[in-house]
């Protein structure tokens, strides 16, 4: 995977001071608690608490929402990273919900990328995409590694016998989920040679809360220790970076805040997943996904 500096190219241009002020005002109007509440079957310390009235978004939906252009309602045509990034989100989401884990490392202490993904529980999650991915992983013998599952679920395999693992129309299905949750709407746009379904933003408050959550994690609420960070927020930062959409959350910041936020993101990206996965209060599969995208 490329470095943060390389991923920064081609993303949204920094906003002018006037638009920054407008964005700041929007954030103040849309400020509120976090987007999550504990889910039944999740690890109790992985979700934000005390926010039962807010719309709950999965990691996949959050990453897609960061990547969508508000008015146009589609992701950048030049973004070729978000597809695999969304599959990484699915693996972490299932792990945080207690459905997946890595096999034991064994006496020889296998590396994260060499260890297989094991189904811990096949209880339905209530999300069609997650349940589809979970069924593939549960039914596959012998088990596959994290890197293999990202590739298989993305359809990036040369083995024609494994093409059935590909999850199709993921972005469109996630966008429809966000439409059902009142975050996006559905429109048709004509692009000369073809018509395309788009999903412009309708609930700016939810997106601004999401952006604020990402910004605060590396600014006002920075703890300088990934194991003291909320696991979902930590995963969101890593996967938004891997999906080439993280800078969209930092574009409204003033220059000094932007530089500080990017510096702290680089600190996270420079962490060694193997070592971090050995510490207490950690999720090994989360760090395995991080290793797969940063190796």
Image (cartoon, grey):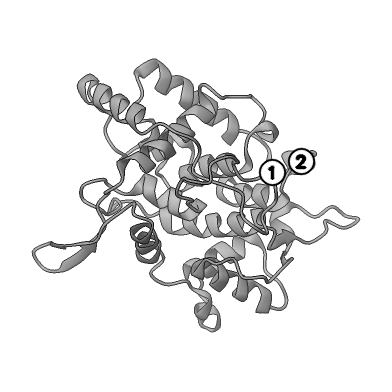
Q: Which residue is mark 2?
A: 281
Q: Residue at coordinates 34% horizontally, 39% vertically from top-left?
A: 205
Mark 1 residue crowding within 10 angstroms, few (<14) / some (14–19) / many (20+): few
Of residue 195 and residue 294, the one placed in the foreground of this image is: 195
Residue 270 relative to residue 19: left or right: right
Residue 234 location in percent, x, y?
58, 39
Residue 20 relative to residue 61: left or right: left
Residue 157 location in percent, x, y?
51, 71
Q: Are marks 1 and 2 in contact (CB under 8 Å)?
A: yes
Q: Is residue 156 visible?
A: no
Q: Could you tell which of marks 1 and 2 lies nearer the N-terminus?
A: 1
Task: Indicate the secondary structure of the residue bearing disc 1.
Answer: loop
Residue 47 location in percent, x, y?
61, 45
Q: Residue at coordinates 52% horizontally, 44% vertically from top-left?
A: 236
Q: Residue at coordinates 71% horizontally, 72% vertically from top-left?
A: 143
Q: Which residue is mark 1?
A: 45
């Amino acid at each position: 995977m490329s470095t943060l500096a390389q991923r920064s190219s081609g993303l949204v241009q920094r906003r002018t001071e006037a638009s920054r002020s407008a964005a700041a005002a929007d954030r103040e109007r849309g400020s509120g608690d976090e987007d999550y509440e504990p889910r039944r079957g999740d690890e109790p310390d992985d979700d934000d608490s005390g926010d039962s009235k807010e719309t709950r978004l999965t990691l996949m939906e959050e990453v897609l929402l960061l990547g969508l252009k508000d008015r146009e309602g589609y992701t950048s045509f030049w973004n070729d990273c978000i597809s695999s990034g969304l599959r990484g989100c699915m693996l972490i989401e299932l792990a945080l919900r207690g459905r997946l884990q890595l096999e034991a490392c064994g006496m020889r202490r296998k590396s994260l990328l060499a260890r297989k993904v094991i189904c811990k529980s096949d209880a339905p999650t209530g999300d069609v995409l997650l349940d589809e991915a979970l069924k593939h992983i549960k039914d596959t013998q012998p088990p596959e590694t994290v890197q293999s599952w990202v590739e298989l679920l993305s359809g990036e395999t040369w083995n024609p016998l494994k093409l059935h693992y590909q999850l199709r129309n993921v972005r469109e299905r996630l966008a429809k989920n966000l439409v059902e949750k009142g975050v996006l709407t559905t429109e048709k746009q004509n692009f000369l040679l073809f018509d395309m379904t788009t999903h412009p933003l309708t609930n700016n408050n939810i997106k601004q809360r999401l952006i604020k959550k990402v910004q605060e994690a590396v600014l006002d609420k920075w703890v300088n220790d990934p194991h003291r960070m909320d696991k979902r927020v930590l995963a969101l930062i890593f996967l938004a970076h891997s999906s080439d959409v993280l800078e969209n959350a930092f574009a409204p910041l003033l220059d000094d805040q932007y530089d500080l936020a990017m510096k702290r993101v680089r600190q996270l990206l420079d962490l060694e997943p193997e070592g971090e996965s050995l510490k207490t209060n950690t999720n090994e599969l989360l760090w395995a996904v991080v290793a797969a995208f940063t190796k």
